């Protein structure tokens, strides 16, 4: 697994990983998480870490990339998740759920939306430095 894929999977597990986190640190964070019996908090609360890790590690690269991009877009408040799960940008609804947004972004017809979101996330990362 490449370091970039490890970082994406680690972020999906809810670990504090950035694009600059070293490979050794990413490995140690994932390893420590996999030694736990279950997730104590977060999106995966109550689930077994190895099963969740495997789900993300086995994802197709384009789906994992879109999933990670959505997570980062939510983290940087480019998109917001409403209490009912809807994803919005400003006042406009973008998708009914995170899962629907990922499907939208991996669709070849929506590559302009994917590229725009990638650029927005890059801009937010630069501003955060």
Image (spheres, grey):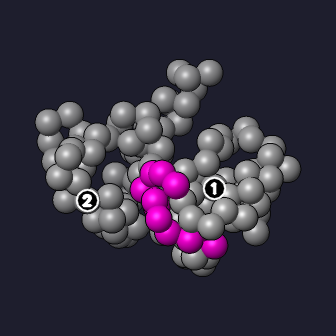
Task: Reply above or below: 91 against 116.
Answer: above
Q: Residue at left 74%, top 56%?
A: 32
Magenta highlight: main SS: loop
- Dots 1, 2 in contact, CB < 8 A: no
Kindly tell me whether residue 127 is visible in this rendering: yes
Q: Residue at left 53%, top 21%?
A: 127
When asked about the image quadrant of residue 126, the answer is: top right
Q: What SS does tag 1 mark?
A: helix
Q: Which mark is residue 79?
A: none
The residue to which callout 1 is attached is: 10
Task: Reply above or below: 14 against 121.
Answer: below
Magenta stretch encompasses residue 118:
no
Residue extending furthest toward the right: 24
Dot placed on the residue nearer the N-terminal end, 1 or 2: 1
Kindly tell me whether residue 59 is visible in this rendering: no
Q: Position of 116 compared to 15: left or right?
A: left
The residue to which callout 2 is attached is: 97
Q: Position of 5 compared to 70: left or right?
A: right
Q: Position of 95 compared to 127: left or right?
A: left
Q: Position of 25 compared to 43: left or right?
A: right
Q: Which residues are magenta?
A: 40-50
Q: How many marks?
A: 2
Residue 79 position within the rendered picture, expressed as x and y whole percent measured from the top left: 31, 41
Residue 74 position within the rendered picture, expressed as x and y whole percent measured from the top left: 39, 42
Q: Where does the N terminus fall, quadrant-wise? A: bottom right
When asked about the image quadrant of residue 38, the answer is: bottom right
């Amino acid at each position: 697994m490449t370091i970039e894929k490890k970082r994406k999977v680690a972020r999906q597990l809810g670990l504090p990983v950035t694009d600059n986190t070293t490979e050794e640190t990413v490995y140690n964070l994932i390893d420590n998480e996999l030694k736990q019996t279950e997730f104590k908090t977060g999106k995966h609360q109550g689930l077994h870490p190895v099963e969740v890790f495997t789900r993300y590690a086995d994802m197709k690269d384009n789906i994992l990339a879109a999933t990670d991009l959505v997570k980062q877009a939510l983290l940087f408040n480019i998109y917001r998740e409403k209490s009912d799960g809807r994803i919005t940008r400003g006042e406009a609804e973008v998708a009914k759920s995170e899962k629907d947004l990922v499907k939208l972004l991996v669709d070849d017809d929506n590559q302009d939306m994917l590229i725009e979101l990638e650029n927005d996330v890059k801009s937010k990362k630069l501003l955060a430095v």
